[in-house]
Image (tube, grey):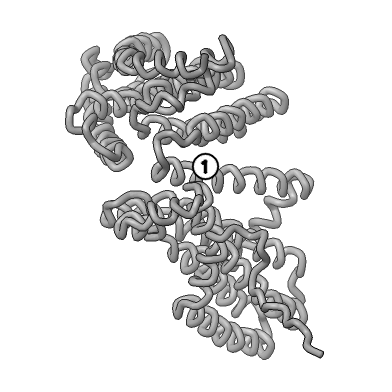
Amino acid sequence: MTTALTPLRDFPDYLSPMVVKELRQGLRTRAFGSTMLLMHVMLILITLMSGSAENSDDTRWMLDGLATLVLCFVMPFRVTNALAEEMKMNTLDMLMLTRLTCSRIVFGKWASVALQSLLIALSLMPYVVARYVFGGMDLMMELNMLGLKWLTGIVFAALLVMLSTIKQSWLRMVIIIVPVLFGGIGLLGMMFGSKGGSAMASFFGLADWWIVLSVVLFASLWCIYACLSFAASRISDPSAPLAWQKRTVHVLTILLLLGISLVTHDSVWIAAALVVMAFLTLDVMTEKLNDVPSVYVPFYRHGWLGRLLLLFSPGWASGFLLTLIMAALIGLCFYLRTGVSDVQDYYLTCCTLWMVTAFIQVFPSSRRADDLLPIFLGTFALMYLVIGMFSGIGVLMAKSMGSQPAFLALLPPSAMIGAAQISSGPERETFMRTAMLCATAWPVIMALISLHAWRKLRPMRDEAVRMSA
């Protein structure tokens, strides 16, 4: 009598094949094994030191720093070249032949690192309990901090997956390393260092735990979705309906944050809406014009409502008009909450961003480029270097002359914010009105460029109307 042997399966069948593929490869690499082994050897030594030390705070920073380094830096940096390698070796087309969508490919790259980081975080739990036994630490706070480190790491991994779509490796390194060196290490040190427990404890004590947990989870989910969807759209086929999905999520997020701000009378929600607005602008203004008629067919099938929703169709031409409307809504909330002064600074900042996008669309080399993201980031960084220089010149001239010269209104819009701080009263208001009037030229120019580009797509939209009939 023979019995059939059930095959051994390391992963269940309901998991995405891309996740299984990346997770198998990731767990078998020497980088993961050596990181896990070295980390646990050091943790054992630190735990023994904390058990023999009279003051456990002397060794607490070691474990916190090691856990932060592994979860927030070592593991996320494994996806720095995740999509760049696939694009360089031209293997994305082979993956798509297996009927895997770009969204599933990007999600699989990120989920592999997220699950490996979760495995490492779970392996740290015995050391957390040991610290509680030896040093009398707050166990729940330690577990919360460990979960927050893992959450920070997977959000950072999603950002790195998005940046891995940039083909220029040197540009990726600059974008990643500069913020980490100038702000990331200090911020993480403040959050997760030896004093991080007390700081986070005071933060968690400001509101009910479920409110804080909901806000943190919502912000993390939005960041992960925003980065992964942005990466998927950059490697997807032009006919993929990713643009309207991304824009819908971002617009609903902005409306939700503005609604909470009006209900709670708290300006911090408007600041959060500005972050979403900045990412939405980066997303839509780096899209190329889509000349595939099938993309517009779903909009025309829904009649007049679908025609109104053409703002959610792919391409920077419709994207600019969408960001213009959302910027006006945020400006209205600013006016209702803080008054005219903050609205003026906000308007000049928006005009600076539109000036950058106008420069990108005016240059012929930018219009012919296959990828607008490096051009956008480079122009944006160069523009703010110029703005910083002109801001200093404007302030010095205003101080020496005792007032703001009228020609300073021709400077980049954000540079005029610093020049306006020299004086107050009617003189400042007159200068700000002149500055805002001059800055209005940039959204007008950008609107004319967008309408011209939208008219060029009219044959594609007419074909979409015939296809939808």
Type of amino acid under label 1: Ala
From the viewer's perspective, is residue 141 above or below residue 38?
Answer: above
Is the residue marked by circle 1 packed among few (<14), some (14-19), or many (20+) residues within 10 Å? many
User: Which residue is identified by label 1?
Assistant: 226
Q: Nearer the viewer, residue 262 or 448?
A: 448
Q: Position of residue 345 (x, y in %)?
A: 43, 23
From the viewer's perspective, is residue 89 above or below residue 128?
Answer: above
Q: Hey, which residue is sitting farthest front in the picture?
A: 1
From the viewer's perspective, is residue 176 above or below residue 465?
Answer: below
Q: Nearer the viewer, residue 2 or 66?
A: 2
389 with respect to 120 (left or right) = left
Q: Residue at x 30, y 37 (%)?
A: 372
Which quadrant would the N terminus be assigned to in this image? bottom right
Q: Hey, which residue is sitting farthest left in the picture?
A: 364
Instruction: Evaluate whether residue 220 shows in this view.
Output: yes
Q: Secondary structure at mark 1?
A: helix
Q: Position of residue 256 (x, y in %)?
A: 65, 29
208 with respect to 93 (left or right) = right
Q: Position of residue 157 (x, y in %)?
A: 49, 57
Instruction: Evaluate whether residue 422 shows in this view.
Output: no
